[in-house]
Image (tube, rainbow, N blue to C red):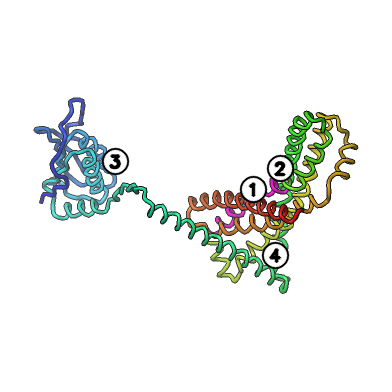
Amino acid sequence: MTSVWLLAGATSIKNNRQVLFGIFELNSGSASVTTDRDDGVVFVRLAGHFSLVDLTSLHGTLMQAAAAGPLTVDLSGVERLDTAAAWAIAETGKVAESAGHTLQISGAAEHAAALVETVRKALPKVESAKRRKFSLAAWLDDFGRSVAAGWTFLTQLLGFLGLFLARLGRSLFHPTEFRLTALVHHCQEVGVKAVPIVALMAFLIGVVLAFQGSTQLRQFGAEVFVVDLIAVSILRELGILLTAIIVAGRTASAFTAAIGSMKMREEIDAMRTLGIDPAAALIVPRVLALLLMLPILGMIANAAGLLGGGLMSWVELGISPAMFQSRLIEGTDVSHLMVGMIKAPFFAIVIGIVGCHAGMQVGNNAESLGQKTSAAVVTAIFSVIVIDALFSIFFAEVGI
């Protein structure tokens, strides 16, 4: 029985092509391959028992022969052919087709031909991506799908927020269900361990503001107003905003990775089986820890920023610490501090909900975990900036 896979259209054999011709045994010792050439066609004759042990040698020989030109594989001497050898023949036909050559099978027994044909049909087919032509209808379709996906994502976040509030309210009526140990642990992870990086960041921001402000204000002889610049910028905007951005990058990724890893290992399903509510055990302690610690981190950032600004003002402008303190108290209203700190709970809720939601959306593979972690960080930082902009517009409209 002969099975021809490819039609005519073979390319000529180039002189610099070299194929290993001769008779040799494969690894198992019970199989042999004879390779020769006749009228530009390479003949590969298989004989004996072929098994998985012979796969590497057989595959290499067939590939080398297929690269030389049209190929004919003679299976008349094959006594036994397993799936591995059939795959080597089928894969050779696929490679020969892509190179513009032909591959023909001859002398195959009925069972061997059927096996090779079955394996050939089971080989994965590479589908080339079709390029879509730009059109207004296609653009509107993509835009509509993006808007719908964004709305769905927003409703899911609102659902998680409602779930957090419901479980938090339940814990108020059932204090024994509240996980105090988990709350303390997450307060340490979210807040205490973030103090060094937050303080250093705010200190350097204060130094930069003082240096840049002094350079500009010196031209007008208004160096003393650099204190107002530092105080208003840090207390009202930069202190809590940059703190929230750092926490978003640090904590949202941690929440997603922790919950996502548990979901990959099916630990969340095991919790449900044991009667443990995953929302009460995983979401409530994390979001509540952010609610408690982010305002504290914001206060630390404000203090460090003012310290950095005061130190740079002393070095660059000669404003002594006592003068800096006096000017800070006289020229800075406490409302600036309140404007900044009011944003902290909203930042905390958004960061916590985004991180926990992304963790719950992780699939059963590591690739999904990485994608959701990256998406959580980007979404959390973007959300923090949007909320800060909305607050800025609101306070400007009400005159605060």
Q: Main secondary structure of the magenta part?
A: helix
Q: CA distance from mark 4 to mark 1?
A: 23 Å
Q: Nearer the viewer, residue 170 or 40?
A: 170
Residue type at the position of mark 4: Arg
Q: Secondary structure at mark 1?
A: helix
Near mark 1 (Cα within 10 A), the count class, few <14, some 14-19 or many ≥20, is some
- In the figure, is residue 31 to the left or right of 302? left
Of labels 3 and 1, the one closer to you: 1
Q: CA distance from mark 3 to mark 2?
A: 55 Å
Q: Secondary structure at mark 3?
A: helix
Is residue 264 at least partly visible in the picture?
no
Q: CA distance from mark 4 to mark 3?
A: 58 Å
Q: Earlier in the sequence, mark 4 or mark 3?
A: 3
Of labels 4 and 1, the one closer to you: 1
Q: Secondary structure at mark 4?
A: loop
Q: CA distance from mark 3 to mark 1?
A: 48 Å
Residue that sits furthest to the bottom in the current view: 173
Q: Are marks 3 and 1 in contact (CB under 8 Å)?
A: no
Residue that sits furthest to the left in the current view: 39
Residue receiving disc 1: 250
Residue receiving disc 2: 197
Q: Earlier in the sequence, mark 4 or mark 2?
A: 4
Residue type at the position of mark 2: Ile
Residue 219 at what x, y percent from top left? 77, 28
Is residue 272 at least partly visible in the picture?
yes
Residue receiving disc 3: 56
Near mark 4 (Cα within 10 A), the count class, few <14, some 14-19 or many ≥20, is some
Near mark 3 (Cα within 10 A), the count class, few <14, some 14-19 or many ≥20, is some
Residue receiving disc 4: 179
- Which residues make up the magenta segment? 240-263
Per the rendering, the mark at residue 102 is none
Near mark 2 (Cα within 10 A), the count class, few <14, some 14-19 or many ≥20, is some
